[in-house]
Amino acid sequence: KLTYLPKIGEKIQTARKLFRDAIQRHNYNGKYIYCYCTKSSHFSFILNEVLENGTQLETSSAFDIDLIWRLYKQGKINKGTTIVNNGYKPRPYVERIVGLINEGFSNVTPVMDNAQELDLFDSLLPKGKYNIGLRMATEEEPNFEFYTSRLGIRQSEILNFYKEKLAQNPKFELKMLHFFVDIGIKDTLYYWSELKKGIKTYCQLKKLCPTLSSLNIGGGMPIRNSLGFEYDYPYMVSEIVRMIKEACDGEGVPEPDIYSEFGKYTVGESGATIFSVIGKKQQNDSEEWYMLDNSLINTLPDSWGIKERFILLPVNHWEREYQRVNIGGISCDNADYYNSEAHINQVYLPSYDESTDEPLYLGFFHTGAYQESLSGYGGLKHCLLPAPKHVLIDRNYYGEFVDWEIFKEQDSDSMLKILGY
């Protein structure tokens, strides 16, 4: 595993400039606030880089709040740092959020997923005035298994929720409306339709609730997943800002501050995973397999679970003739192979002679988001195959590359101890 740390700051500053330019172009009166959703990668070296670039934070679970405390005690954040609490919130998560608020964290905004969460916060918080947000459930894509997201409050119920639960409650001030379109920020009729619904709901809610001041558009900014990737970032950001501006002007309400929660966009392109080909197998006249030195299921679980595509390139032997091959992981699982496209199994890679040549190394690039968390980095692994060593790459004061090993390859003792041996 490789992580190139400077890429993280580059992505953050790029997004900030995109929104800054769009805000200026459309004479938008609100601010843009960049939040990093910690679930994309919780590693301390990632959070250090993220926070050095002045971002705010979004959490997803009870243990996330414990991580917030560690960052505070290390001096990485202060009690004025904006912390948006998302996700479905069981009692331990709510109690930890309340603990932050009681200890003086002044910019904590728990986003309500349902009425029961609000009741629990109401019962646990002492008398005072507290910021909260509401999450609006979005409709899923037409071809999805469900019609509406399981997360959030139905759009048709948002206004009544405010009237019945919040308008007369002196303890809470509604500050934020949040929604997230699961496909991400894409130039599709579906995305623009859901965005318009969210903006319309904000305008309706703002007329009822003067304290409402922020619209959280969630995450979903895409990253490059192929050499032919094309995405017009300036156009998409400009359209988002323009649509919010025009809707608010039309409804006669002030423009909100725009929050985003970019996780994959922040860290995805900073990561790479390098395999060596340890063997070749010709299984029939037309199918040759390159066998890797680790499991794809373990190291790149999204490639197996949701058929995620990553940039795949040979690291060496570029001058060789290329041939069609299948890529197989080393586990005994039939599903442990790389699908470069949803329906095309084979890829073109250099040929080599395993008896005389240097091993062929393959790089999967832009793997920096979610893969370690989903695979349980450092814990139990399918077929007891070890997590690979992890190397960080940075630039020093003079712009020179520096690298160091942050984690060694996992040893058997760490797994066997978990298993009780």
Image: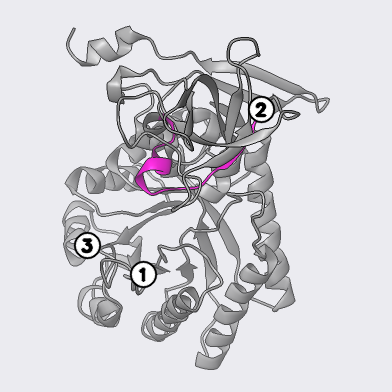
What residue is shown with label 3? 118
Q: Amino acid at mark 2?
A: Val
Q: Is residue 385 above or below residue 343?
A: above
Residue 233 part of the magenta segment: no
What residue is shown with label 1? 174
Q: Is residue 265 above or below residue 278?
A: below
Q: Position of residue 415 (x, y in %)?
A: 28, 14
Q: Position of residue 84 (x, y in %)?
A: 41, 54
Residue at the extreme front: 285
Q: Which sits in the foreground, 65 or 18? A: 18
Camera-side mark, 1 or 2: 2
Spatial distance from mark 1 to mark 3, Cα to Cα?
12 Å
Mark 1, residues whose alpha carbon is within 10 Å: few (<14), some, or many (≥20)?
Answer: many
What residue is shown with label 2? 315
Spatial distance from mark 3 to mark 2, Cα to Cα?
52 Å
> Which residue occupies 76% across, 29% down?
319
In primary-sequence order, the first of circles 1 and 3 is 3
Q: Is residue 73 visible?
A: yes
**In the rendered image, which quarter is residue 164 located in?**
bottom left
Q: Amino acid at mark 1?
A: Leu
In primary-sequence order, the first of circles 1 and 2 is 1
Mark 3, residues whose alpha carbon is within 10 Å: few (<14), some, or many (≥20)?
Answer: many
Q: Is residue 42 above or below residue 258?
A: above
Q: Position of residue 227 (x, y in %)?
A: 66, 49
Spatial distance from mark 1 to mark 2, Cα to Cα?
52 Å
- Helix, strand or loop at label 2? It is loop
> Which residue occupies 58% across, 21% down?
391
Circle on res. 103: none
Q: Is residue 167 visible?
A: no
Magenta stretch in the rendered image? 299-315
